Amino acid sequence: DALENIALNAAKAAQAGVKAAKARVSQNKNRHLIIVMIVVLYSDVEIPSQMAKIQDHVKKDVERYTGIPVSAVKVKVNRVETLGSKVE
């Protein structure tokens, strides 16, 4: 749970247009972490560049705070939502 919370906080701190996120953390055979982020994004973001930003931020923060190497951060976009309804 602590590792997932670090990953979630890092994804939100990346300021990449993340509305909501879930994280799943597992280990590979080398005892390195594999983190899968499932995110809901706002519609005004450039998805490829923002996903790279999230991956980088999550990897650096988890390694910095835990000292455990991260072998992969996978980001899956679950949904894209509009910023808000427009009123005319």
Image (cartoon, helix red, strand yellow):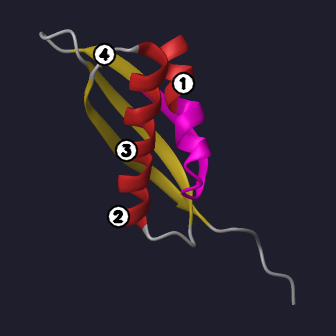
Q: Earlier in the sequence, mark 2 or mark 3?
A: 2
Q: In whole angstroms, how far apart are the C-alphas of marks 2 and 3? A: 11 Å
Pointer 1 residue: 6
Q: Tell me where residue 11 appears, x and y as whole percent.
A: 53, 41
Task: Please rate how many residues cluster around mark 2, counting C-alpha atoms within 10 Å: few if below 14, some from 14 to 19, many from 20.
Answer: few
Q: Does residue 26 appear left or right of residue 14 in this picture?
A: left
Left or right: residue 17 versus residue 27 is: right
Q: Residue lying furthest bottom in this view?
A: 88
Residue pushed farthest right? 88
Residue 5 coordinates in the image, percent (x, y): 57, 22
Would you identify the image quadrant in which residue 10 lies? Answer: top right
Query: Would you say the residues marked 1 and 4 are in contact, meaning their CB atoms lie under 8 Å apart?
Result: no
Front-lying residue, 77 or 35 = 35
Q: Amino acid at mark 2?
A: Pro
Distance, label 1 to label 2, CA atoms, is 22 Å
Q: CA distance from mark 4 to mark 3?
A: 16 Å
**Crowd class of label 4 (few under 14; some 14 to 19; many from 20; radius 10 Å):** few
Sequence-wise first label, 1 or 2:
1
Q: Which residue is mark 4?
A: 26
Compute the Cα span from label 1 to label 4. 14 Å
Tell me which label, 2 or 4, sits earlier in the chain.
4
Report the residue marked by disc 2. Answer: 48
| For the residues bearing labels 1 and 2, Cβ distance under 8 angstroms | no
Residue at x 49%, y 54% (from the top left corner): 79
The amino acid on which the numbered mark 4 sits, given as a three-letter code, is Ser
Q: Are marks 2 and 4 in contact (CB under 8 Å)?
A: no
> Who's the residue at 30% across and 15% down the image?
26
Q: Is residue 78 visible?
A: yes
Quadrant housing the C terminus:
bottom right
Q: Position of residue 72 (x, y in %)?
A: 25, 33
At horizontal 34% and vertical 28% (from top left) the residue drawn is 35
**What stretch of residues is rendered in magenta?**
8-23
